[in-house]
Image (tube, grey):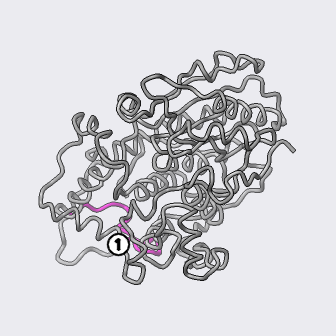
Amino acid sequence: ELWQVSDINKNYTICSTYPQNLILPKKISPSLINHLKNYRDQQRFPILSHFNGKNVLLRCAQPMMGVLNKNSIQDENLIKEYIKTADSTSMELNNKSKLMIVDCRPLKNAMAQQYIMGGGSEQVLNYQYADIPGKYDTTKKLFLNMPNIHIVSSQFEQIFLKYTLNGIKSKSNLINEEGEQKEDEEDDEQVIVFNPLDFNWYETIANVLENLDYLLKEYLLNSTHFLIHCTHGWDRTSMLTSLMMICSDPFYRTIKGFFLLIQLEWLDYGFRFAERFDVKVSNMSNELESMDSFAEEEMEKEEKVEEIGEQEEEEEDSKPKGGKSPVMIHFLDLVWQIVNQQPDKFEYNEFFLLKFLDNVVSGKFSEFINDCDMERKGFFKENGFSSNDYHWSKFFEINQNYINKNFKQLGNENIKCDEEWIFPDSKKVAIW
């Protein structure tokens, strides 16, 4: 056994926003984790998201390098051990594998974090691993220029106002839940259809899909291990790791797989559901805020959003790290883009995605009104019920309209078949 399920984070003593049990290489000791935990923001050290049989997909938060460019030998050794364990586990000779460090942020924002907030982005030279055969000078780093939560909020406001004031119609609102064409609206309401790239929201989606296509080819075709992070490692990081898992592993295109993906990459690994949807536990008895109320609040400003420009991007690091933002809506739109391009490779469809979002904001599921596993477990304990008996996926009612009847589930032996991998096309972005 080269891997272990470790209780290194028992009682959340290492990282308050990670689960208590984590998959680690067998050779990693508690002492090593204790020494490296403070090197990354919020103690979010590198953990495993996915292993495709050859390469690992790791996630973490930014390194706290500061102006002195501090490094951590323990952090470097942990990542090295992940690579060595994956290479040893692989059924193929994997001496040609390499590491790519993916920073989801723009370069200038990472630099601002380093010199203002004490964060930063890895120095590639520290992760070249000359002691592993074939690995020296193979590590690369890539910045993805993904916008932060504040810019995503502004982009969402822009597109919502366009929808509301101009009556945009998209494929989603021109068909009913049975997938049939809706009858004409009363009074022959004028329909205005916009180009998706007229919106910053969809420009961002196109950019993410373009980068995703490149990363998937590296992961699946070029034997590349990945270390992915943004600033804190719970917004853009969750989005990117999830998209890579959906495109590379058919299991996550099943309903069961989607539930597990949300549990692992979002709930267990610390996506801040309550904060991003502005949900308070004290308001649980009331109807919680939905996507519509989010948008209605934005409309009270009574002014249209201007183009997102350079000045707003430069203000990213002067804003607080938290706040309300439609990160999950952004992720679901990205998933829908992929479903729309390859519908028969998914068991679920757009109505399933919309129902999932409705459940997230409905207030029916207490998992979504807390920000991390520690808060969630504490909430369950205070209210006297077991999280195992009250798991949200058990109460998700699956309507036949949510299922793609043309989907054919593959066995595990076909997961590596390149015909079942998805490489999204950024030129086929559509308005959902």
Quadrant of residue 168 in the image? bottom left
Residue 11 left/right relative to 53 = left
Q: Is residue 180 magenta?
A: yes
Q: Is residue 350 above or below residue 188?
A: above
Point out residue 144 in the picture as x, y percentages from the top left corner: 44, 34
- Which residue is more in the foreground, 161 or 57? 57
Which quadrant of the rendered structure holds the N terminus?
top right
Residue 122, relative to residue 54: is it above or below? above
Region of the chain picked out in magenta, as a range:
167-181
Q: Is residue 281 left or right of residue 63?
A: left
| SS assignment at label 1 | loop
- x 61%, y 74%: residue: 391
Task: Give x and y (percent) for residue 167.
Answer: 21, 64
Residue 98 percent across, percent down from the top left: 67, 26
Any magenta on residue 413? no
The one nearer the camera, 253 or 55, is 55
Nearer the observer, 221 or 85? 85
For label 1, count other residues whose C-alpha is less than 10 Å away and answer few (under 14), some (14-19) or many (20+). Answer: some
Question: Which amino acid, mark 1?
Answer: Glu
Q: Residue furthest right?
A: 1
Q: Residue at the spot x=60%, y=64% of the render?
A: 259
